Image (cartoon, grey):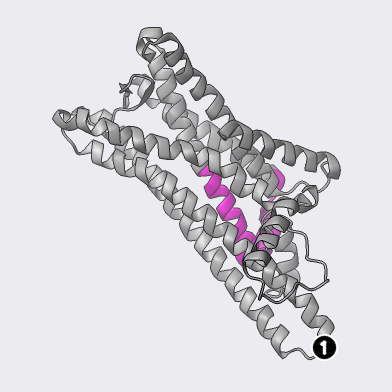
């Protein structure tokens, strides 16, 4: 599922780039491309080592003495890097909706690319610290995976574990806060456009306002899914890192099953990301969801014939918002992405 989802997501992104010939590539496009590539590389590199262990019926350390450190480095890197990219995407959307003037002036594709490169370099250097003695990587049962040593009496190992957990926790909190602020702005826009549609006598204006409601509600649903999936997948590993840092070596064996479960939750995050960020935003998927709701709730008012605005990126939203805030809509997908469905 991870491979299929990320490959489909990358195909959608690069098809969009070819259609627009790179002229309307948004900041969101740059960031979400980095997220998809990170998730795909993580699945390919880590899964190949795990499958090799099962194929050879050997542990990582039995195959190669350095393989455990390599796996631990990659595991911690691909756990931290996508989280920071998700934070960058959340900040980008918040700036575009809440601070459109600052967004148009300061946020560019070049700076988004520099942000991606900075995230990659920082995560690589940070996760390489155990290789020079600050922290340690350890093999966990059943011998098919390695990660940061969670329960160690050595101060440096414990310090690195706590530092990694704190960094993840701060990133998770920041993502949740940014998404909540975006939701608040969307709700305000929804209430404002609904109030205007009720008070308007002109039927043509009512028809034009109706798609806006569904558009904003669609974005609210996507943001809710993003926040829930991110929190559910990321919180367990941070909790296990904190518990492991303050637990004794005697209970390490009993706790390894819980550690493995937390790692599985973290792995699910890279499977969910491409579906929530890209695939579910295509026009085909959105139309199917709307048809499903129409069948489930036939008493709903029929949709108007007015054309629903395309779900462009947060960059397009900021341009509209800077002109007529707060009457504009939020765009959270790559420009023209809906037309690709």
x and y, in percent, of residue 160 in the image? 32, 33
Q: Is residue 187 above or below residue 167?
A: below
Task: Residue at 66% x, 45% y: name it.
Answer: 111
Q: Nearer the viewer, residue 13 or 295?
A: 295
Q: Is residue 130 above or below residue 180?
A: above
Name the residue that disc number 1 marks: 202
x and y, in percent, of residue 90 in the image? 56, 53
Q: Nearer the viewer, residue 296 or 267?
A: 296
Q: Nearer the viewer, residue 9 or 84?
A: 9
Q: How many tags in the picture?
A: 1
Task: Residue at 78% x, 64% y: name it.
Answer: 309
Q: Is residue 207 magenta?
A: no
The boundaries of the magenta stretch are 84-109
Indicate the quadrant where residue 97 lies: bottom right
Q: Is residue 101 magenta?
A: yes
Q: Is residue 53 left or right of residue 143?
A: right
x and y, in percent, of residue 128 in the image? 42, 25
Q: Nearer the viewer, residue 116 or 215?
A: 215
Quadrant where the N terminus sits is top right
Indicate the quadrant where residue 307 lies: bottom right
Q: Is residue 237 above or below residue 305?
A: above
Q: Is residue 144 left or right of residue 181?
A: left
x and y, in percent, of residue 83 in the image? 49, 43
Q: Chief secondary structure of the magenta span?
A: helix
Task: Residue at 56% x, 43% y: name it.
Answer: 273
Report if residue 12 is visible in the image.
yes
């Amino acid at each position: 599922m991870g491979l299929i989802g990320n490959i489909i997501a990358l195909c959608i992104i690069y098809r969009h780039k070819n259609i627009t010939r790179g002229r309307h590539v948004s900041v969101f496009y740059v960031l979400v491309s980095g997220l998809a590539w990170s998730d795909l590389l993580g699945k390919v590199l880590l899964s190949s080592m795990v499958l090799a262990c099962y194929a050879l019926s050997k542990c990582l350390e039995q195959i190669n003495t350095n393989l455990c450190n390599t796996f631990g480095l990659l595991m911690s890197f691909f756990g931290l890097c996508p989280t920071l990219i998700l934070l960058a995407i959340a900040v980008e959307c918040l700036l575009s909706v809440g601070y459109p003037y600052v967004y148009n002036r300061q946020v560019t594709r070049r700076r988004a690319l520099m942000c991606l490169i900075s995230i990659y370099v920082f995560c690589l250097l940070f996760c390489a610290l155990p290789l020079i003695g600050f922290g340690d990587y350890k093999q966990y049962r059943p011998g098919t995976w390695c990660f940061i040593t969670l329960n160690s009496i050595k101060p440096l190992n414990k310090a690195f574990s706590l530092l990694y957990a704190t960094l993840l926790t701060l990133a998770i909190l920041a993502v949740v806060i940014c998404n909540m602020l975006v939701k608040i702005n969307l709700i305000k826009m929804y209430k404002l456009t609904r109030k205007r549609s009720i008070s308007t006598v002109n039927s043509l204006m009512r028809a034009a306002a109706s798609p806006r409601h569904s558009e904003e509600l669609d974005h609210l649903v996507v943001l809710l899914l993003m926040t829930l999936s991110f929190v559910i997948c990321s919180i367990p590993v941070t909790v296990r890192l904190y518990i492991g840092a303050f637990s004794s070596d005697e209970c390490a064996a009993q706790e390894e099953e819980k550690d493995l479960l937390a790692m599985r939750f973290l792995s699910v995050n890279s499977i969910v990301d491409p579906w929530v960020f890209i695939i579910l935003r295509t026009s085909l998927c959105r139309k199917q969801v709307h048809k499903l709701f129409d069948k489930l709730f036939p008493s709903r008012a029929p949709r108007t014939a007015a054309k629903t605005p395309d779900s462009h990126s947060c960059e397009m939203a900021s341009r509209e918002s800077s002109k007529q805030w707060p009457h504009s809509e939020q765009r959270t997908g790559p420009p023209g992405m809906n037309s690709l469905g």
